[in-house]
Image (spheres, rainbow, N blue to C red):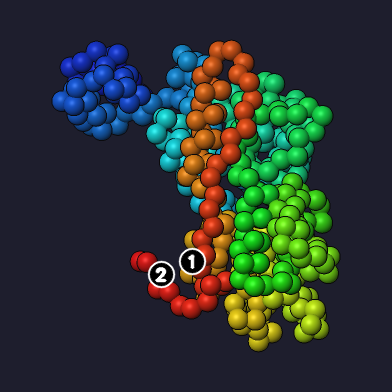
Amino acid sequence: MAAVRLKDVAEHAGVSIKTVSNVVRGAPRVSDATRSRVLRAVDELGYRPNPSARGLRTGRSGLIALVVPELATPYFAELAHHVRGEATLLGLTVLIEESLGDAAEELRLAGGVGASLLDGVILSPLRVTSDELASVTDEFPLVLLGERAYGRNGVVADHVLIDNVAAARDLTAHLIGLGRTRIAAIGVDRQGSATSRQRLEGYQRALYEAGLPFDPRLAPRIEEFDRRNGLLAMRHLAALPAGERPDAVFCFSDLLALGAQRALHEAGLAVPGDVAVAGIDGSEEGLYSTPSLTTVVPDKAAIAALAVTCLAARIQSRAPLPFEVHVAPHWLEVRESTAGGRRAVDA
């Protein structure tokens, strides 16, 4: 069977080919009655837009990619949901890729694998450096998410992030405000990621401002920001002598915090009675843990909106645009793991 064309839909609906094109593209200047007639014809004939043909006409495919380290991580799954929603509002389709935190894979995907199909990429990198990305962003639209350490090339792409130093400082200050004085930090990355360094800086800054010493024994090194590493690090901390054991722990991700809570349960230590626990990510999983998890919530909807808007502007621009760094909001959500008590979850 021959493919249904715009011309066929136009004849079936009794309108011009341009009107059909406007309806398919979501253009606003079409009456509701005409739009309904065209959409009915589209359904009856089974018309499907041809991305390749559209690309030949406009030089764009309408396809972008979102590259995250791991979709199994709740934060990235929730972020992907928001990115897809924002892209849909702009008529863009999102392809989702996992880099698994491999620097070579991050660099490969940043350049738009199959770039003839992709208009641009939103990348949340873990390992690849800004200097390595510089060669990609000269030729291909790219927006970076998350914390970056800028190298000799400076800012090499539009960048959307939260202020991680401030977020870590805020959360540590909250624990200090509860009267906790031996505050551990779980999240010092052996590979020295920018996320880990910045959150450690905010933690140390809050300790310094409160006149508390930094004890390296309370900042064990980990391999990944996951539940298992949180469990193992907290087991080590819980095994310290009573006078040296922490009375609070700031975890650099919610998954680390959930693993830490499990280790404290195994050790017979109460949360928050014996040890207060807090994380960063604002993942929904922490709302339903027992006790519910105090966390810093990055505004994922704002991050997605900024990233998609930046990428769309760069795709549509005919002239080079200066790179910009956008800081999205964050806030502290105090729950049972530091505040104690029991509160019902809003259904």
Label whose residue precedes the other's in the sequence (1 or 2): 1
Q: Looking at the picture, does residue 98 appear above or below residue 10?
A: below
Q: Which numbered marker is on residue 227?
A: none
* Amino acid type, label 2: Val
Q: Are marks 1 and 2 in contact (CB under 8 Å)?
A: yes
Q: Position of residue 118 (x, y in %)?
A: 57, 28
Judged from this view, the residue extending furthest toward the left is 33
Q: Residues within 10 Å of mark 2 (few under 14, many from 20)?
A: few
Rendered residue at 65%/77% (across/down): 275
* Amino acid type, label 1: Leu
What number of labels is visible?
Answer: 2
Q: Position of residue 22 (x, y in %)?
A: 31, 19
Rendered residue at 46%/35% (across/down): 87
Q: Looking at the picture, does residue 272 appear above or below residue 147?
A: below
Q: Which numbered marker is on residue 287?
A: 1
Q: Which type of secondary structure does the marked residue at label 1 adopt?
A: helix
On the image, which quarter does residue 49 sit in? top left
Q: Which residue carries the number 2 mark?
A: 345
Q: Position of residue 185 (x, y in %)?
A: 73, 64
Q: Which type of secondary structure does the marked residue at label 2 adopt?
A: loop
Nearer to the camera, 247 or 285: 247
Rendered residue at 74%/72% (across/down): 182
Would residue 233 be seen by someone viewing this image from the given angle? yes
Rendered residue at 51%/61% (across/down): 333
Nearer to the camera, 306 or 34: 306
- For the residues marked 1 and 2, what is the alpha-carbon distance in whole angstroms? 7 Å
In the picture, the quarter occupied by the N terminus is: top left
Q: Position of residue 164 (x, y in %)?
A: 65, 49
Nearer to the camera, 63 or 258: 258
Q: Residues within 10 Å of mark 1 (few under 14, many from 20)?
A: some
